[in-house]
Amino acid sequence: MPASSPVPVLSSSSCMGESETKRQQILTGASAVFAEHGYEGASMSAIARQAAVSKGTLYNYFANKADLFAAFVEQRCREKLPVALAPVREDSPPRETLTAVARAMVRLITQPESLMLYRIIVSEAPRFPQLGAIFWENGPRVGIATLANWIREQEARGTLATEDPVFAAEQFFALCQTRIAHLRRFNLSPENSEADEEKVIHAAVKVFMAAYGTPSAP
């Protein structure tokens, strides 16, 4: 009798790759549905259709809509925040570091996807408080903690002096949200986006250094 053909066996790495691809496919579909319908208006059925998967497959990856939204927010923050906060890992003078962070943050928070997330959180948080908690834990809290740690390092070097590094980090990020971010969140456009962007960036650094910079700061 002829020998039977060997049955192909998928490796675990291949299965994991396919699983991650499918998960990403679902998250991409969810992004489109959340953007169009908000959180409450987005249904798991609509997300399954947009992602071109069955509802059974969808529920294999995410137990419910809150779980899916949390994964969506976590992924976006994990992709975007490290890039925006990368300057704090470089050994540059405080003004240079803060300028780079401010520029990255202004551009990040005014991206269409960031604006979409912000609007969803603000509009839906009163009815779904967990949405605010999910966003805060994965986004602002991580950014504030990262910048606060950098501020502590600068205090040890004698270039900055604050009473509360965490509060100082919160203030800096608030300064980065003036004018441009507020207008964009209301679907309004600044008259001169490029000039306003540079103004916001350099003013944020100037105000922060005036409040917390020491005479020895470069």
Image: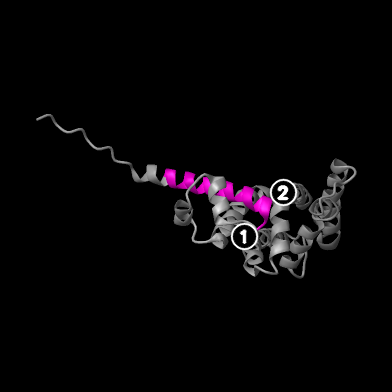
- Tell whether 166 sits left or right of 205: left
Q: According to the image, label 2 marks what residue?
A: 108
Does dot 2 land on a helix, a strand or a loop?
helix
> Residue 176, percent across and down?
80, 54
The amino acid type found where label 1 is placed reads Asn
- Residue lying furthest top: 2
Q: Is 212 located above or below residue 56 in the figure?
A: below
Q: According to the image, label 1 marks what residue?
A: 138
What is the span of residues highlighted in magenta in the rendered image?
A: 17-40
Going 69% across and 66% down the picture, which residue do you hit? Answer: 125
Going 70% across and 69% down the picture, which residue do you hit? Answer: 126
> Residue 104, percent across and down?
73, 47
Whichever of callouts 2 and 1 sits on the residue coming sooner in the sequence is 2
CB-based contact (under 8 Å), mark 2 and mark 1 = no
- Asked whether residue 31 is drawn in magenta, I would say yes
Q: Which mark is residue 63?
A: none
Going 58% across and 51% down the picture, which residue do you hit? Answer: 46
Does dot 1 land on a helix, a strand or a loop?
helix
Q: Quadrant of residue 140?
A: bottom right
- Tell whether 201 sits left or right of 39: right
Report the number of numbered marks: 2
Of 39 and 156, the residue lying toward us: 39
Q: How far apart are marks 2 and 1 (CA)?
A: 15 Å
Of 209 and 21, the residue lying toward us: 21
Q: How crowded is mark 2: few (under 14 residues within 10 Å), some or many (20 or more)?
A: some
Q: In which quarter of the image is the N terminus?
A: top left
Q: Is residue 89 something one can see in this rendering?
A: no
Q: Is residue 41 something one can see in this rendering?
A: yes
- Residue lying furthest left: 1
Of 155 and 35, the residue lying toward us: 35
> Residue 215, percent across and down?
84, 58
